[in-house]
Image (cartoon, rainbow, N blue to C red):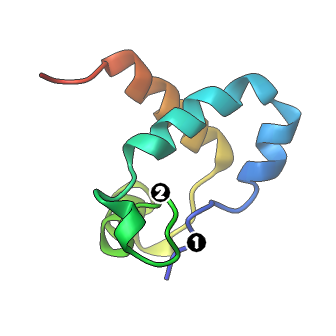
Amino acid sequence: MTSLIPKGLVGYLLRHPLDVPPVVIAAWRLRRRAWWRYAPFLPLPAPAYWEFRIATVSGSHGTVEPRAVVDAAKWSLRQGRGH
């Protein structure tokens, strides 16, 4: 299973604290519906959905650079939400 936190992301965010809010907001938007019903009772994405998202970004190697995570989070905020 792919890690929910890409390798190096925490260190990157510690060095770039202004990038924390967009990443947190993007993570919140990816949470599983009714997440409180599923162990570990945290607002995490569904495992199959997360695997799909990582595979579409990284291909078969399953790694994503921290800067790419931040760029994607900022892009998603600029897109707004569809109604």
Q: Which amino acid type is marked by label 1?
A: Ser
* Nearest to N terminus: mark 1 or mark 2: 1
Above or below residue 81? Residue 52 is below
Total tally of numbered discs in the picture: 2
- Identify residue for label 2: 43
Residue at 62 percent across and 61 percent down: it is: 5
Question: Could you say where residue 78 lies in the image, as x and y percent from the top left?
Answer: 39, 16
Q: Which amino acid type is marked by label 2?
A: Pro
- For this view, does 3 lie left or right of residue 79? right
Q: Nearer the viewer, residue 31 or 13?
A: 31
Binning the other alpha carbons within 10 Å of mark 1 as few (below 14), some (14 to 19) or many (20 upward) gives few
Question: Could you say where residue 1 lies in the image, as x and y percent from the top left?
Answer: 49, 83
Which mark, residue 54? none
Q: Nearer the viewer, residue 24 or 54?
A: 24
Binning the other alpha carbons within 10 Å of mark 2 as few (below 14), some (14 to 19) or many (20 upward) gives some
Above or below residue 44? Residue 14 is above
Question: Could you say where residue 43 lies in the image, as x and y percent from the top left?
Answer: 47, 57
- Identify residue for label 1: 3
